[in-house]
Image (spheres, coloured by chain):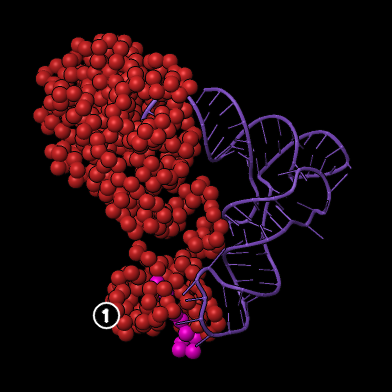
Chain colours: A red, B purple
Amino acid sequence: MKDLRTHYSLDVSEKDFGKKIVVAGWVEDIRNIGGIAFIILRDRKGTLQVTGLKKKDPKLFEKLVGVSRESVISVIGECKKSDKARNGYEVIPDEFNVLSEAETPLPLGVVDKVESELDTRLDNRFIDLRKPDVQAIFKIRNEVISAVHTFLINKNFIEVHTPKIIASSSEGGTDVFKIKYFEKEAFLAQSPQLYKQILMATGLDRVYEIAWYFRAEEHNTRRHLNESTAVDIEMAFIKSEEDIMKILEGLVYTMWKKASECVDELNILNKKLTIPKLPFKRISYDDAVKKLNANDCKIEWGADLGTEEEKILGDIMKKEGDEFYFITNYPLIAKPFYTMPEGDKLSRSFDLECKGVELASGSQRIHNVNLLKKRMEECGLNPKDFDAYLKAFRYGMPPHGGFGFGIERFVMELLDIYNIRECILFPRDRTRLTP
RNA sequence: GCCCCGGUAGUGUAGCGGCCUAUCAUGAAGCCCUGUCGAGGCUUCGACUUGGGUUCAAAUCCCAGCCGGGGCGCCA
């Protein structure tokens, strides 16, 4: 049995001219001129042209032009130099096989001259993903995640995987999905927060996870998902939250830089990336509020920044030359119970903002079990529900902190994508459960 | 949780009480064409979210359902 493919479209070079090659992929388009026909074949790397001549082999020609668009075929033929064809060569078929015939009409055109709605595209995601610009997003996503692994492993982090089926709602706050766990009730983890903290009591010191977040909030917006991914880290023996911010800004810088090296994909998307400068500006919550008030945006001290305020602050910071910045020392009241207080009212926390959108949020955590219990109670939680978590703080827990960093939000900002659903292969939102 | 908005061929749209036997593009099917690359030309096919109501007359107005989009809150 012969190979179904010896060459990808873009891997053919001059030394192949005049030789027999085998190419395979999807029939993107057929232009039948009468006595000659051009089949545009698409594979993972690009497209190539198969040129059929009626005179040469009428039967093969009929079969070739009769195949439906987006069918999968494999073609054996001569690779012939041609200045008229797009890659400088064309394949003159001797033989071809339809590996899979596509039904017609297509539910979504790959190269049609009409746009499709996102909903239609997501309903037919496997076809949508045949488009090079859609694929480019996920190729870049792959690169930045690979940069995460390299960067964090170099900083002595180890990758961990914490459970996603959990017994109690992890942090209060957001809604969680309830599931049946045999005779018990369980929940899908909204974040790995409590588990990565427990791991700080083990001596592993630095852990990270590419984590799934499940959130049962019924929002329907272009920047929310009910199932999303994040880079979550936790590190022990820190002096302060500044140690964590250093890791985070280095990580973001590295991811951005790695993305900027995806030249082919960025060209397809028609995007240019400017690598951010380190260090990112640190601005305290107090100063952020002052800045906002000075710009006719009235905000009460203590309130979390709303979408509107975040945007305005983003504009102010951009004017001052900072696209990326940390907002530090939030009011304690706006942060979860495990956040380390700073004085009475503030916290040792930070949010990383990019152009007015929150990319990541983190803090130094409380490592004293009594303070932790006190904070739980102040937040309206019952420490008894957190026994398994609290136990880890009773037998030697070093000072520690970490952050969670949404991957889809990052990709969205990185590539300037309007709807977050485009940043994940198969989005789960308020209404979408398939595909 | 609160508040807006929308559903017309496979896809994307026009129409917003009678001119609708519903527009245009794209697509599909077929015919012509030996250098296409957004190929071209000709022919054909294909749709008003569902159920009630108003009206002489409903794609169009009203009500309800179903499906979807978005904003806010909250968050990543």
Count of numbered tags: 1
- Residue A269 to residue A236: above or below: below
Taking B49 as reference, is A316 left or right? left
Mark 1 closeness class: few <14, some 14–19, many ≥20 residues within 10 Å:
few
Q: Nearer the viewer, residue A254 or A314?
A: A314
- Please tell me which residue is depicted at 21% across the width and 33% down the height of the picture: A246
The answer to which quarter of the image holds residue A301 is top left
Residue nearest the observer in this picture, A156 or A198 = A156
Quarter of the picture containing the N terminus of chain A is bottom left
Q: Please provide percent x and percent y for residue A123.
A: 49, 49
Residue A383 position, x and y percent, is 26, 14
Q: Residue at x 37, y 65 (%)?
A: A46
The segment highlighted magenta reads A48-58
Q: Disc 1 designates what residue?
A: A15
A50 in magenta: yes
Element at label 1:
helix
The correct choice, above or below, for A85 with respect to A268 in the image is below
Magenta stretch contains residue A364: no
Residue in the picture at 15% in, 33% down: A206
A113 is higher (above) or lower (below) than A22: above
Tag 1: amino acid: Lys
Question: Whole-percent x and y of residue A250?
Answer: 22, 39
Q: Position of residue B28 (x, y in %)?
A: 57, 67
Q: Give the vertical position of A381 relative to A111 (above or below).
A: above
Q: Please give the name of the residue rendered at 10% of the width and 29% of the height, measured from the top-left corner.
A: A203
Q: Locate residue A234 relative to residue A321 in the image: left or right.
A: left
- Asked if residue A415 shows in the view, the reply is yes
| Chain under disc 1 | A
Residue A268 quadrant: bottom left
**Residue A104, picture quadrant:** bottom right
Horizontal side of residue A395 vs A431, given as left or right: left
